[in-house]
Amino acid sequence: MSRVIQAATLVLLICLCILGIAALGTFLYVRYGDAPSRVSEVERRMEPLESRPVWRTRHYVSHISTTDRPAGTNYYEECRLVYGTNSVQTFSCFLGKESGHIVTAWISDWTPRSEMAKFEKFSVSRHHDAGFDIVAKVSTNESVAMDFTLTFIIAE
């Protein structure tokens, strides 16, 4: 009788293993069987992103300082703030010959670090395709001498 129980147990274990393998195979087929359709769906969703313009970055290094010179005596890549005025001063600059147009710009670095605290407002904005404006408003009776870097994203 014990041989019959051993044989039945062995047959039961073999059947359970076959059922386990069949269940695992079914699970894997259901889980990953439609992978080609998922890949094609992702490719379809990526097409609009790939057809967008090429993006690149460009850095523009400049200097801003206060001076006693009259307005309009700025040098290339230098912004001169009129000392003693608390009004907003705007500087129109040009990146030069660029293929494409400026999408956005920001101030990415400045030295010395303490100089930024002297501004009530200091920002950059896109003016036209290759031009931009630097807007600065210095706190009252402050003198500024700062190098800064602007970072641009340009779309071709």
Image (spheres, helix red, strand yellow):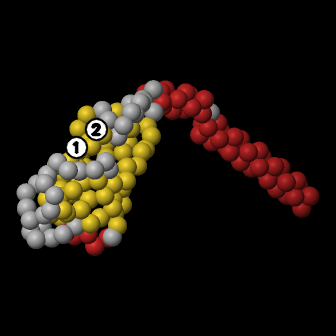
Q: Does residue 36 appear to the left or right of 95 in the view shown?
A: right
Which residue shows up at 42% across the image and 45% down it? 58
Q: Residues within 10 Å of mark 2 (few under 14, many from 20)?
A: some
Q: Among all residues in the image, which is located at the extreme bottom?
A: 114
Q: Does residue 123 appear to the left or right of 36 in the view shown?
A: left
Q: Which residue is mark 2?
A: 131
Q: Dots 1 and 2: beta carbons under 8 Å?
A: yes
Percent position of residue 68, x then y: 15, 62
Q: Which residue is mark 1?
A: 92
Which residue shows up at 22% across the image and 43% down it? 92
Which residue shows up at 30% across the image and 40% down it? 94
In this view, the residue in front, 68 or 123, is 68
Question: Vertically, is 97 above or below 136?
Answer: above
Percent position of residue 155, x then y: 39, 34
The amino acid sitting under disc 1 is: Ser
Percent position of residue 63, x then y: 31, 58
Q: Is residue 94 visible?
A: yes
Q: Is residue 1 visible?
A: no
Is the N terminus in the top left, top right, bottom left or bottom right quadrant?
bottom right
- Secondary structure type for disc 2: strand
Q: Residues within 10 Å of mark 1 (few under 14, many from 20)?
A: some
